[in-house]
Amino acid sequence: MAKTPDAKTPDIKLHSTKNPQKENVRGAMVQLLQTHLGTSIDLSYQAKQAHWNVKGMNFIAVHKLFDELHEQAEGYVDLIAERLTGMGGQAQGTVQASVSNTILEPYALDIVHAEDHLRRLSDSYAAWSKALIEGIEEADEAGDDLTADLLTEIGRGINTSLYFLESHFQVEPGRAI
Ligand SMILES: [Fe+2]
């Protein structure tokens, strides 16, 4: 009789490993991390898109900020991919795979002005922050403290970057942005 897959044992093949985490937990975490890998690759090039195309009076400051955000996201790509492969998974690390795996909305290719890039990027940073909080909860519930810790570290960095982006257009407390 065929084995019925259930939510706790995703139907993915894992490499054998001495990693002490249980196989069904590793499978669930590999699936979770695949989403964050695709999102980090997508975000890293959203920041580069802004870096290359931004125009405005504060050009140099935001041009440099967007490059730093790209480098930060690229660092997270590697951390996520190597946690995923360390748990026996096969990283889906291509740009084409990331199109299927990212949680972000497509970044419009015609954005020009600095404030528009800052606002559009802040939407992506907020969306990933929310997904990271959900991922931390999922890893906690699965009993994988190390994946929860990695996602916490990334969430802290992404929250700081969201603050850098939003500070360009935030106004007095209580007024909508
Ligand atoms: Fe550059």
Image: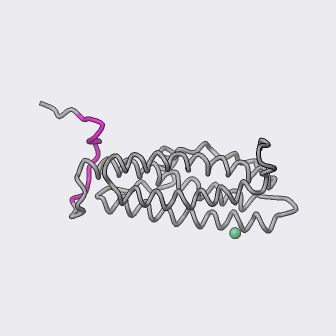
Residue at 28%, 49% (x, y): give it.
Answer: 25
Q: Quadrant of ligand 1?
A: bottom right
User: Residue 139 placed where, x, y %?
Assistant: 37, 50
Outermost residue to the front: 173
- The x, y position of residue 169, in whole percent, is 79, 52
Q: Is residue 6 magenta?
A: yes
The part of the image, by quadrant, that contains residue 148 is bottom left
From what the image shows, is residue 5 above or below residue 67?
A: above
Horizontal and vertical percent position of residue 173: 77, 48
Examine the image and state in which quarter residue 3 appears: top left
Residue 20 relative to residue 75: left or right: left
Residue lying farthest to the right in this orientation: 57
- Residue 10 in the image: state x and y as whole percent: 29, 42
Residue at x 24% of width, y 35% of height? 5
Rendered position, 36 above or below 1: below
- Residue 162 lies left or right of residue 54; in this view the side is left
Q: Is residue 62 left or right of residue 33?
A: right
150 and 60: which is toward the camera: 150
Q: Is residue 176 left or right of residue 134?
A: right
Q: Assign the magenta stretch its main secondary structure.
A: loop
What range is drawn magenta here? 5-16
Which residue lies most toward the left here? Answer: 1
Indicate yes or no whether the magenta region holds residue 167: no
Q: Quadrant of the N terminus?
A: top left
Q: Is residue 64 above or below residue 143?
A: below
Report the residue that reaches farthest toward the top. 1
